Amino acid sequence: MTPPEITDSHCHLDFPDFSGQLNTIIANAAAAGVTRMVTICTKLRLEPQVRSIAEAYQPVYFAAGTHPMSASSEPLATTDQLIEMSKHEKFVGVGETGLDYYYTIETAEIQKKSLRIHITAARQAGLPLIIHARSADDDISKILIDEYRNGAFNCVMHCFSSSRNLAHTALDLGFYLSMSGIAAFPKSQELRKIFASVPLDRILVETDAPYLAPPPYRGKRNEPAYTAHRAVKGAEIFGIDYAEFAAQTQINFDRLFSKAASCTVNT
């Protein structure tokens, strides 16, 4: 039986964990029904290696930005730099960017500056912003609201595991929440309640591979094929069957990542 089609909206296929194994990783994903993957560049100097993966594998698209935890150690991105990268046919989003005060609160100011640059680029390029938010809900909310007043943009809250308030802020702005393996962890009851309150047409799914493997693979390397496992949990949260949940997340992905949905590049 052919599994329902689903998309891994956020993974890191250039990380060393996958070195020399991408043929197998892509084949595993296809066998699990994962028809598309967005691999994320977290340091702009590494964009060529991330881009090369998207060019080599038809189901893979890419996005690029400076991860907030690298905002102080990497050169500050420029709007022009990001927009130039976005001209590639398989470049479908800007980021990941955002704020991480859990590990790097001491670099908060440069993180904020970097985030605003990425927002400007996403707005001008007409591509979705990919947000990483950890222990920084108030500042993330303020910046997203402030910047949206300057001009609309689309956005996904990647690997969402923040507060109900931040979820509501994002949804009020028309943004999306992406469900990772965290939602399947036994201690994530409150997170599952938050997701259950979110309109189904605002949900994406992701692995964040090689991180956050869901049960029954917890503690092991994650990979895009495991998207189905968090989607099964997502279907359970929404009280619908897996095929219906997968189909709706495909529609949601196509709506937000419209450049990927319309891409006709054969690699």
Image (cartoon, grey):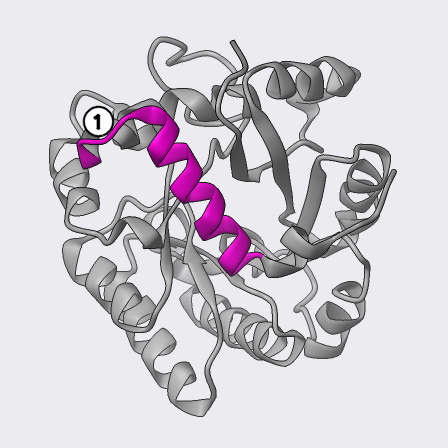
User: Which quadrant does the C terminus fall into?
Assistant: top right
31 and 150: which one is in front? Answer: 31
Secondary structure mainly formed by the magenta segment: helix
88 and 68: which one is in front? Answer: 88
Q: Secondary structure at mark 1?
A: helix
- Give the residue at the far front of this rendering: 1
The amino acid type found where label 1 is placed reads Glu
The picture places residue 100, in percent across and down from the top left corner, at: 39, 54
Q: Does the magenta run of residues contain 240?
A: yes
Q: Is residue 135 left or right of residue 211?
A: left
The picture places residue 213, in percent across and down from the top left corner, at: 42, 20
Q: Is residue 73 left or right of residue 207?
A: right
Q: Is residue 16 left or right of residue 244?
A: right
Q: Is residue 62 left or right of residue 215?
A: right
Label 1 Cα neighbours within 10 Å, binned few <14 / some 14-19 / many ≥20: some
Image point 47% across, 26% down: which residue? Answer: 227
The picture places residue 1, in percent across and down from the top left corner, at: 51, 9
The picture places residue 155, in percent across and down from the top left corner, at: 45, 64
Image point 80% across, 66% down: which residue? Answer: 87
Image point 47% across, 49% down: which residue? Answer: 251
- Which quarter of the picture shows residue 186? top left
Q: Which residues are magenta?
A: 238-257
- Give the residue at the far bottom of this rendering: 150
253 and 152: which one is in front? Answer: 253
Image point 20% across, 36% down: which residue? Answer: 238
> Badge 1 is on which residue?
236
89 and 15: which one is in front? Answer: 89
